[in-house]
Image: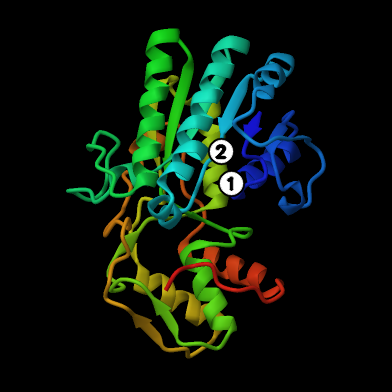
Amino acid sequence: MILGGGGFIGRHLAATLALRGVEVLAIGHGRGLEPACTSYSWQEMHLPSAELTDVISNWRPEVLIHAASTADVGRSIREPAHDFENSVRVWAGVLEAVRLASHDCKLIYLSSAAVYGNPTSIPVRETDAAQPVSPYGHHKHICELLARCYCEQYGLKISIIRIFSAYGPGLARQLIWDICCQVRAGQVVRLMGTGAERRDLVNVVDVVGAIELVASRGETDCEVYNLGSGHGVTIRDVAETLLDVFGTECNLVFSGVVRAGDPLHWEAEINRLSRIGYTPSIDMRSGLEEYVSWFRKLPPVPSSFPL
């Protein structure tokens, strides 16, 4: 069972697992956005919902992957209560539904590197302190604490995956999307920050592969797994690679002002995932080429990334 089956990661995960013969029920909204795959079951639902307990009771999933959450740091700063409702309250409802309806189900919570905030050392290890710098990061951390409570108090089997900067075809928001929109418009590409900020980009293909590994081999005592490529790249490197893939000579301009809630440097240590078989397969250049190929097929749309 995949909660958030209409979202970026949820759509890719449901389609990939179904094509491999896994029986999948995806729950969410916006099914028309998923990749071309009809070989899994779908249920329209807006979480939180009292209906979820009955659905879990009837379906009795072996694994439930929680991919339903907010994914907008900026909005979490502008509307923290909205982010709390759609992150913490939703996850609390999921935990309670599993406790009541399918206690032996294995739960995987998709968290975020945002819980680390601005780490004091690189690469970032799972044992490093949580020090979020945005409501989004704080809410992810609260969700992890709730998971630990249900694991210790009620014996639920839970794994936590902290995803770094996931990207790939279908992601119509955030940095890579915004750069592509500006290039298409023939604009100067204007970005926040200095360009020296570092991110650990991980392609959605590798995200899906890692989730599969955790589902089959991961520890279930609230073990935390970093999910990234294991390599940090600067925002400038990402932007310049995209411009090169597009074959454009657009000027690249950075504001010099770091947006509130944005960390300065991220690079994941991925030893825990590696020990259960994870090896990133998509390098940045190849991943960005695939993204641009997908983007070029889309009709023009306005940029959603604040400049």
Residue occupying image coordinates x 33% and y 42%: 115
- At label 2, which amino acid type do we have? Ala
Q: Which residue is mark 2?
A: 67
Q: Look at the image and tell me in which quarter the N terminus lies.
A: top right
- Image quadrant where one finds the C terminus: bottom left
Which residue is found at the position 36% from the left and 32% from the top? 142
Q: Nearer the viewer, residue 73 or 200?
A: 73
Q: Which residue is mark 1?
A: 9
- Amino acid type of the residue that numbered disc 1 sits on in the rendered structure: Ile
Is 141 displayed left or right of 181 in the figure? left
Q: CA distance from mark 1 to mark 2?
A: 7 Å
Instruction: From the viewer's perspective, tell me whether residue 160 is left or right of residue 120.
Output: right
Reading the chain from its start, which is encountered first: label 1 or label 2?
Answer: 1
Taking 300 as reference, is 83 above or below it?
Answer: above
Residues at badges 1 and 2 in contact (C-beta under 8 Å)? yes
Choose top left, top right, bottom left or bottom right for residue 140.
top left
